[in-house]
Amino acid sequence: MRADSAAADLCLRGARIVAPAGAVHAPLAVHGARIGATPSAAAAPIALPGHLVFPGLINAHEHLQVNAVPPLPQTAPFANSYAWIDAFAAHFRAPAVVAALQVPKTLRLRHGALKNLLAGVTCVAQHDPWHAELDAADFPVALLREFGWSYALHGPAYGPPVARSFAATPPEQPWMIHLAEGTDAIAAGELDELARLGCLAANSVLIHGVGLGEADIARILACGAAVVWCPSSNLALLGRTLDPRRLHAAGRLALGSDSRLSGARDLLEELRVATEHGLEAAHALALASTAAARILRLRGRGHLAPGAAADLVIVGDRGGDPAQSLVGLRRSELRAVVRDGRPRIADPDFADWFDATGVAAVPVTLDGAPKLLAAELADPAVLALEPGLELQGHAPRVVASAALQACNA
């Protein structure tokens, strides 16, 4: 058994634990990769006074493999995403784009996952053909796995055909498609077209939705479908985004980052943009936690109830509304990101948690701030793709407890 794969029982004490109804001072038990009901007698204590513990964030829409591809220069908004795709055809010949796409896809997928993890995202909905690398045991984030998808109603042939893919997706699983990604008549007519194909149902998850009208939103809510909102991408490509309030109020809106090819740096920046478009911090945070988990049918995520994944984001507690302590932070200001009960990146004073779980760590700087990064994530070829993340060049650090050492012997 690898040292960094060992399960450990932990008890987090002194922090406020964030739940849908609010935050409470209570111990949080971690049994291996899951949240426990009560701490075990052998649980290693992790003292977190003055902190808040959130569930790991969920990114409801990403294209992991293109986060290091240079964006398409543009001087005016596009009418729809199909026009952007057409314009990008020439951009593929730009030397910087050619060089970026020559990086092996395995590394580009890991880079996109690491980008998400650094911002507190522990689960991602990848909207592209599945790749064997996504099944790697050490992939940096968890992934939505039980779902169907098609790319879009029009544009280049890419991915599964719309009607066939929808029909093949069980109704208890989400089915995703880019839809109404534009401000013109083409985008405005896409919901009707989707319905005529028989692909608008309670499990339909529509990505972007900028061109949806009020009647369209009413129709979406009536059938129980949902929308994933990517505001930064919409504003950059189309010059406009949707009004999130009605969909959010009905619990039918989640948040995605699309990718750096068109969107913001990460989901933390998307949370900030969401608050600039009519949502309070707590409402914006729900789009990347409880609402996203419900829409994507991720029953063990978006909360910290017993049995849930032990995926955590830990920040300093500013008091008051817990969401105000997270929304608006930069990634370097997160105190720790934990996946499956094991710290992945954290401030240096979290070294004891790395030690308690037997996780080898290396010192890095993230946007100038010193951090410890799990050594298995510190592939120099991947780190080289991420601006602001620098390896400090020291040997991995790991001091496993006696119990873990015995287990690994």
Image (cartoon, rainbow, N blue to C red):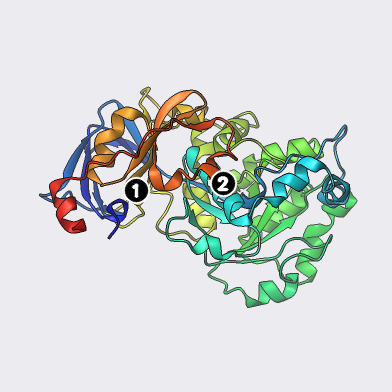
* Residue 167: image location, x then y, percent: 67, 76
Q: Secondary structure at mark 2?
A: helix
- Measured Cα–Cα span from mark 1 to mark 2: 27 Å
Q: Could you tell me the amino acid type at mark 2?
A: His
Whether pointer 1 and pointer 2 mark residues with C-beta atoms closer than 8 Å, the reply is no
Q: Residue placed at 27% from the left, 60% from the top?
A: 1
Between 12 and 171, the residue placed more toward the observer is 12
Q: Residue placed at 40% from the left, 30% from the top?
A: 371
Between 179 and 93, the residue placed more toward the observer is 93
* Residue 107: image location, x then y, percent: 58, 51
What residue would you read off at disc 2? 111
Q: Is residue 28 visible?
A: no
Q: Earlier in the sequence, mark 1 or mark 2?
A: 2
Q: Callout 1 environment at 10 Å: few (<14), some (14 to 19), or many (20+)?
A: many
- Residue 113 left/right relative to 73: left
Furthest residue to the left? 41
Question: Quadrant location of residue 178?
Answer: bottom right
Q: Callout 2 environment at 10 Å: few (<14), some (14 to 19), or many (20+)?
A: many
Q: Secondary structure at mark 1?
A: loop
Q: Residue placed at 58% from the left, 47% from the top?
A: 112
In the image, residue 171 sits, relative to residue 308, either above or below, namely below
- Residue 64 left/right relative to 33: right
Tell me the quadrant of the picture where the C terminus can be found: bottom left
- Residue 229 left/right relative to 90: left
Mark nearest the camera among 1 and 2 is 2
* Residue 321: image location, x then y, percent: 41, 28
Q: Is residue 284 visible?
A: yes
* Residue 153: image location, x then y, percent: 80, 63
Q: Residue placed at 57% from the left, 55% from the top?
A: 125
What residue would you read off at disc 1? 304
Q: Could you tell me the amino acid type at mark 1?
A: Leu
